[in-house]
Amino acid sequence: MLDGFLRLSQPASTDGMVGLLLEVHAGLRRKHPADSASYIIALMGEGLTITTLHAGDCRLGRLTNQGSIRWLTPVHTLANAIQDLDERALRLSPDRHLLTRSFQAKRFQPPDCVIHEFDERDRGLLIASDGFWADL
């Protein structure tokens, strides 16, 4: 993925990243037919804009001035596919370990693509991978 990103002749875009994901998928599907992975890609835009592409249980969060994390991307798990859960219930659900969308060798699933606007007063951003968000 990184090699493809470095080869881009134009600024990174959502379509360009999905194209790279398709290339990577084509190369991995025969080598790793039973594997899957969660991922998040964050593209810095103009000003305080970030576009995320994600699948699985990786998340982008905003660090608030109060010291808390406000998660901006949903996870793709059975827990929140069955019903809409608040963050605490989602964190405690045993079904949060069962992914409903991921980067799978068997078939390509396009990522969720979301544009996020940030406030310059925010303390920062946090990317948490593979379910580690639940421990923060």
Image (cartoon, rainbow, N blue to C red):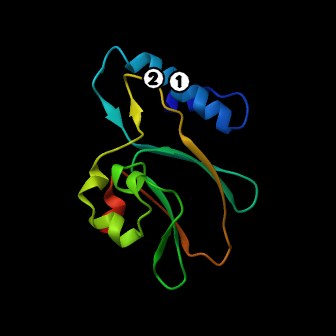
Which quarter of the figure has residue 32?
top left
Estimate how packed mark 1 is, as few (under 14), some (14 to 19) or many (20 or more) residues with alpha carbons within 10 Å. Answer: some
Which quarter of the figure has residue 133?
bottom left
Residue under the image location 60 percent in, 34 percent down? 17
Q: Quadrant of the C terminus?
A: bottom left
The x and y percentages for residue 35 are 29, 29
Residue under the image location 53 percent in, 24 percent down? 22
Q: Is residue 3 placed above or below 89 in the rendered structure?
A: above
Estimate how packed mark 2 is, as few (under 14), some (14 to 19) or many (20 or more) residues with alpha carbons within 10 Å. Answer: many
Q: Is residue 33 placed above or below 94 in the rendered structure?
A: above
Question: Dot 2: what SS?
Answer: helix
For residue 82, side relative to residue 92 (left or right): right
Q: On residue 25, which mark appears?
A: 2
Kind of residue at disc 1? Leu
For residue 134, side relative to residue 4 (left or right): left
* Residue 136 appears in the figure: no
Q: Is residue 25 placed above or below 90 in the rendered structure?
A: above
For residue 48, side relative to residue 101 (left or right): right
The x and y percentages for residue 16 are 65, 31
- Residue identified by numbered label 1: 22
The x and y percentages for residue 81 are 41, 51
Question: Dot 1: what SS?
Answer: helix
Kind of residue at disc 2? His
Residue furthest front in the image: 82
Residue under the image location 42 percent in, 70 percent down? 86
